[in-house]
Image (cartoon, grey):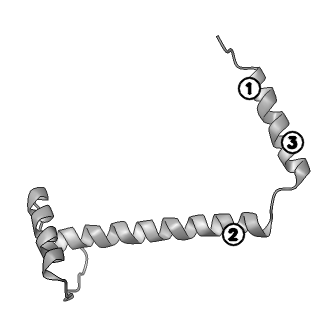
Amino acid sequence: MPHVVKVAISLPPTVLDSVEKERRKRGESRSEFFRQAVQAFLRDLQQRKAVERYVQGYLEHPERAEEVEAISSASYAALAEEPWD
């Protein structure tokens, strides 16, 4: 593992108990458990921000009626070519 830095955190005893039970079940060290938890949190945060940017883009630049019509027409044409047996 590349260079690491130790940090100290404070947790309520009930949270630490839950962490300890889960990490033991997984056979992980406390450090590995928290490393994975933080990485998952950061990935989720990044994904939520990306979705917010996506939605904001649509709010700032909504589809025009002719764009919706073109997409609908193309979709109907593509579906019409499919065998629906």
Apparent side of residue 40 relative to residue 16 in the rendered image (left or right): right
Q: Which residue is mark 3?
A: 70
SS of the residue at dot 3?
A: helix
Location of mark 2 (residue): 56
Q: Are marks 3 and 2 in contact (CB under 8 Å)?
A: no
Disc 2 + disc 1, Cβ < 8 Å: no
Labelled disc at residue 79:
1
Left or right of 63 on screen, residue 8: left
Task: Tell me which amino acid carries mark 2.
Answer: Gln
Q: Quadrant of residue 74?
A: top right
Q: Secondary structure at mark 2?
A: helix
Q: Amino acid at mark 1?
A: Leu
**Looking at the image, residue 16 lies above or below residue 7:** above
In the figure, is residue 49 to the left or right of 85? left
Label 2 to label 1: alpha-carbon separation: 30 Å
Q: Position of residue 84 (x, y in %)?
A: 67, 15
Quadrant for the C terminus in the image: top right
Residue drawn 19% across and 89% down?
Answer: 8
Residue 25 pos. (x, y %)? 10, 57
Residue drawn at x 43%, y 66% as measured from the top left: 44
Of the image marks 2 and 1, the number of the one nearer the N terminus: 2
- The residue at the point 86 percent across, 49 percent down is 67
Q: Measure how far apart labels 3 and 2 are at the Cα level.
A: 23 Å
Q: Is residue 81 above or below residue 50?
A: above
Image coords of residue 28 (percent x, y): 12, 63
